[in-house]
């Protein structure tokens, strides 16, 4: 194929967008509306997920050490705990540090008047987890470690968070899947209708000796461009809306900032951007390719 | 009825179109074509006439390789159409100009672009297109309207654009399916004169028509079809009524 034929097909694809501006507008609007809804729900659900995950990671298991455990043994135990997959972070507080922290939290003032540390047997590890559903496994392990005398956990919190997390997981997948399928259905239908209206054009091309590629290429290029534009519009809108929502929540509900923690927009868009562009461009391509194929058998 | 047997033409050239015992049956009902034999030599002007359902459109579709025959053999330009692979069809069609009753122009492109489009398909260079398109537009008498969109033209002018598009790649055969069906009598004659001129330049012209007047007046070869069968094939024939 000549290079200028390829350029001609590309140029025709681009021109078709303006030649059929009402069909283009309807298709772009449908793609934008579908992907806007998809992107909006996606943003909400990943933030829900993020908040629950954050809550999970704030649930600590406390492992109290036996009195008189050597520093070497403390290091060994710490290494053993840190090597576990479900463990995100481990902090160690010696008996003195525990007492100082306790006194500070309870406004004891000057603690130098105490000649002895009342929490002498309270040297401990605070262990934060990646996956709170594995808390009982961790607790069993800690109880078997030589040098740990007691393990404190909040089994109820862990169970509730695990339950909420799995429900949100299923609901998220369900909603995103439904929106994904609805988007694909609506977008491909719109692309199909747009091309059906111009099937005569394809037939003319075929009657006068156009190859399948020559007849199809302008439509496919048009579909890709429309899909791309249709996905960029909702992404831009969501980007600005999301930022505004985060700023509004941070200023209006600052007292809840420890519970409501939004993901940065860049993090949401790391996944949302390729998915939306993939859906738009992918359906634009596949929809136009398959619809044109139906009319090529002339 | 003057001659019920389709006959092989004699001449210096082998037939450019040859149908031998061609039948075409759709899924149900009587066959659209039934054991048709037809030979058309290079440079002939042939009318194919017949009432609705006589098989004229099926014949055109078979010649364009839009359909395959149920049985028999069709050779066009030396190519057995049944043996064509799908990817070979476009190249095959580039040797056949085709004109339809409803013109089938690209309404969003101007006259020049409609004709140039056929040249793009055969991958002509920009320079060749700029030379060939104005030339063929002059031939059909539309040189001054190359910027007009089809909707801005009369029916006759639109059909001239379709003819220019069909001829710009210099096909050996021009198939015209009811080319004057949508035109008034004066324009009809303009178009028929144009087709005759094209034929005089060496292109084989096959015109499917219902128009009794032009068939009777032009005194060309007339193939009459009825219920999928060729019932008459006359060298200088006229329109035969069904009785």
Image (cartoon, coloured by chain):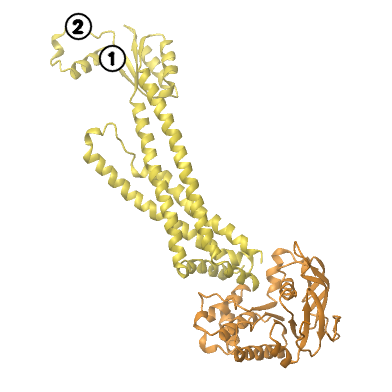
> Hue of chain B?
orange
Q: Which residue is mark 1?
A: A94
Check chain identity for marks 1 and 2: say if they share one: yes
Q: Is residue B179 left or right of residue B10?
A: left
Q: Is residue A97 left or right of residue A154?
A: left
Q: Which mark is residue A51?
A: none
Q: Position of residue A237 (x, y in %)?
A: 35, 52
Q: Which residue does the image show at 49% across and 82% down from the upper left?
A: B152
Q: Which residue does the image show at 41% across and 26% down from the upper left?
A: A163
What chain is tagged by disc 1?
A
Quarter holding the C terminus of chain A is bottom right
Q: Is residue A137 left or right of residue A65?
A: right
Quarter holding the N terminus of chain A is bottom right
Element on which disc 1 rests: loop
> Hue of chain A?
yellow
Quarter of the rendering containing residue B131: bottom right
Q: Position of residue B49 (x, y in %)?
A: 74, 82
Question: Which residue occupies the foreground of this view, A88 or A218?
Answer: A218
Q: Position of residue B4 (x, y in %)?
A: 85, 81
Q: Which mark is residue A116?
A: 2
């Amino acid at each position: 194929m000549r290079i200028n034929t390829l350029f001609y097909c590309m140029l025709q694809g681009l021109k078709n967008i303006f030649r059929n501006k009402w069909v283009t507008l309807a298709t772009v609007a449908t793609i934008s509306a579908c992907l806007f809804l998809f992107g909006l729900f996606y943003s909400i659900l990943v933030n829900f997920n993020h908040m629950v995950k954050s809550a999970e990671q704030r649930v600590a298991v406390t492992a109290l050490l036996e009195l008189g455990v050597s520093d070497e043994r403390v290091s060994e135990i710490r290494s053993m705990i840190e090597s576990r997959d479900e463990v995100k972070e481990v902090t160690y507080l010696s008996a003195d540090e525990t007492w100082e922290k306790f006194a500070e939290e309870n406004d004891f003032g000057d603690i130098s008047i105490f000649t002895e540390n009342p929490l002498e047997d309270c040297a401990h590890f605070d262990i934060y987890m990646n996956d709170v559903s594995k808390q009982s496994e961790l607790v069993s392990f800690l109880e078997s470690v030589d040098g740990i005398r007691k393990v404190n956990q909040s089994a109820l919190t862990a169970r509730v968070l695990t339950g909420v997390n799995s429900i949100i997981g299923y609901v998220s997948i369900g909603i995103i899947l439904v929106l994904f399928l609805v988007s694909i259905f609506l977008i491909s239908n719109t692309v199909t209708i747009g091309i059906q209206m111009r099937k005569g054009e394809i037939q003319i091309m075929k009657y006068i000796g156009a190859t399948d590629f020559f007849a199809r290429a302008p439509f496919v290029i048009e579909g890709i461009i429309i899909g791309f534009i249709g996905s960029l519009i909702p992404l831009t809108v969501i980007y600005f809306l999301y930022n505004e929502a985060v700023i509004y929540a941070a200023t209006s509900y600052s007292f809840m900032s420890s519970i409501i923690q939004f993901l940065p927009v860049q993090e949401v868009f790391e996944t949302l951007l390729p998915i939306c562009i993939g859906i738009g461009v992918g359906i634009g391509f596949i929809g136009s390719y398959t619809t044109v194929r139906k009319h090529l058998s002339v | 009825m003057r001659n019920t047997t389709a006959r092989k033409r004699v001449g210096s050239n082998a037939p450019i179109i040859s149908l031998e015992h061609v039948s075409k049956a759709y899924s149900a009902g009587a066959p659209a074509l039934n054991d048709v034999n037809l030979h058309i030599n290079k440079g002939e002007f042939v009318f194919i006439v017949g009432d609705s359902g006589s098989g004229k459109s099926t014949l055109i579709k078979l010649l364009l390789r839009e359909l395959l025959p149920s049985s028999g053999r069709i050779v066009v330009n030396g190519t057995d159409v049944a043996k064509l692979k799908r990817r070979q069809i476009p190249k095959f069609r580039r040797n056949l100009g085709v004109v339809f009753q409803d013109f089938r122009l690209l309404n969003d492109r101007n006259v020049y672009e409609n004709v140039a489009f056929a040249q793009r398909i055969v991958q002509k260079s920009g320079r060749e297109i700029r030379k060939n398109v104005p030339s063929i537009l002059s031939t059909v008498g539309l040189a001054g309207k190359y910027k007009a969109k089809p909707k801005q033209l009369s029916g006759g002018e639109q059909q001239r654009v379709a003819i220019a598009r069909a001829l710009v790649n210099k096909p050996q055969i021009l198939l015209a399916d009811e080319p004057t069906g949508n035109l008034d009598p004066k324009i009809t004659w303009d178009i028929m004169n144009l087709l005759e001129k094209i034929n005089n330049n060496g292109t084989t012209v096959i015109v499917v028509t219902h128009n009794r007047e032009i068939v009777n007046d032009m005194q060309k070869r007339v193939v009459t079809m009825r219920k999928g069968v060729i019932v008459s094939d006359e060298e200088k024939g006229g329109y035969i009524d069904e009785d």
